[in-house]
Image: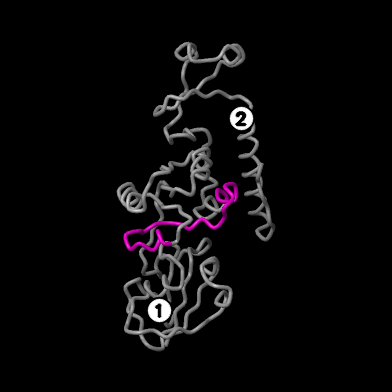
């Protein structure tokens, strides 16, 4: 018999009766604390600290009768590097791979300049392999994917609304200060560079050729871009997003949205 308590957003994975409270579990054998936690619904990449009887433990700790287990998500305001035994370290350059349910989110994160792999034919094993190879964070709506023992970094995106999803990811990984808009192609994730008008003039419609002089090209799919009405709408949205972020820093309890 053990007691178990999940904190903060980890309660999202629990049934209502077990949220924000300590409850007991009767177990057979001596499972690892990782297996116990994931049996309750919380995938291990969401966890930053496990305390058993007030001592930090790793995922392979074998649960004992009478253990008091407290499970915490990532600490945003407190550095627990010296305390946690889970050995989770931030990636210097955040890069993502998204599952098949998050195509619209991939486009929005690319708009902000983040390296995001996405394919509507990606299988779970492929996502896990590519994430490990490229040191990418898995973004998914499937908690089962995050419970795979080979996954080390991932996040379960709570919302089904793409705009809310992007704000959740930006907040989760503290990415607002890393936004570099219009550096990546929203379609293919390639880098966007400036291109001379005379090099691509034969690809332009007459009105575009007449009214615009600054052009950009994706180095991967070779799509041509210019600062038309769509560019202005996206710029306005990103400005509102950053304004909302700065306002939230000043008033952390306020609810806000930057939706267009």
Locate residue 201, reporting x and y percent.
Answer: 49, 12
Q: Who comes first in sequence, dot 1 or dot 2?
A: 1
What residue span does the magenta drawing correspond to?
144-167
Which quadrant of the structure image shows residue 37?
bottom left
Tell me which residue sits at (52%, 43%) in the image. 104
Q: Residue 145 lies in magenta, yes or no?
A: yes
* Badge number at residue 155: none
Give the side of residue 216 with respect to residue 163, left or right. left
Q: Quadrant of the N terminus?
A: bottom left
Of residues 80 and 203, the one nearer the viewer is 203
Residue closest to the eye, 198 or 244: 198
Residue at x 63% of width, y 30% of height = 232
The residue carrying pointer 2 sits among few (fewer than 14), some (14 to 19) or many (20 or more) residues within 10 Å by Cα, namely few
Q: Which secondary structure lies at badge 1?
A: strand
Quick check: is 166 in the magenta stretch?
yes
Look at mark 2 in the image and give the residue it sits on. Answer: 230
Quadrant of the image for the C terminus? Answer: top right
Name the residue at 35% across, 72% down. Answer: 58
Q: How many marks?
A: 2
Q: Residue lying farthest front? A: 121
Q: Nearer the viewer, residue 211 or 146?
A: 146
Residue 222: give x, y in percent of width and height.
Answer: 42, 24
Alpha carbons under labels 1 and 2: distance apart: 53 Å
Instruction: Name the residue at 55% across, 77% down.
Output: 18
Q: Classify residue 186 as left or right of residue 20.
A: left
Reading the image, the residue beneath label 1 is 55
Question: Does 205 appear above or below 75?
Answer: above
**Residue density around tag 1, few if under 14, some if 14–19, many if 20 or more, within 10 Å:** some
Helix, strand or loop status at disc 2: helix
């Amino acid at each position: 018999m053990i007691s178990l308590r999940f904190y903060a957003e980890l309660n999202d994975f629990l049934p209502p009766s077990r949220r924000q409270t300590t409850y007991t579990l009767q177990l057979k054998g001596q499972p690892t604390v990782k297996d116990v936690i994931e049996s309750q619904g919380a995938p291990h990449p969401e966890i930053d600290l496990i305390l058993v009887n007030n001592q930090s433990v790793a995922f392979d700790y074998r649960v004992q009768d009478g253990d008091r287990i407290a499970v915490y998500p990532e600490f945003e305001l407190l550095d627990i590097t010296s305390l946690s035994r889970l050995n989770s370290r931030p990636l210097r350059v955040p890069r993502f791979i998204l599952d098949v349910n998050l195509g619209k989110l991939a486009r929005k994160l690319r708009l902000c300049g983040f390296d995001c792999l996405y394919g509507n034919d990606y299988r779970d094993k492929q996502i896990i392999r590519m994430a490990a190879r490229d040191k990418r964070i898995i973004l998914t709506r499937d908690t089962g994917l995050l419970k795979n023992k080979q996954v080390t970094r991932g996040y379960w995106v709570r919302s089904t609304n793409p705009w809310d999803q992007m704000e959740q990811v930006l907040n989760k990984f503290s990415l607002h200060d890393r936004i570099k808009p219009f550096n990546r192609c929203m379609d293919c994730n390639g880098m966007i560079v400036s291109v001379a008008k005379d090099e691509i003039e034969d690809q332009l419609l007459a009105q575009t050729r007449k009214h615009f002089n600054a052009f950009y090209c994706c180095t991967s799919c070779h799509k041509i871009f210019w600062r038309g009405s769509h560019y202005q709408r996206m710029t306005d949205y990103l400005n509102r997003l950053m304004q909302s972020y700065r306002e939230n820093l000043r008033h952390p309890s306020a609810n806000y949205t930057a939706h267009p």
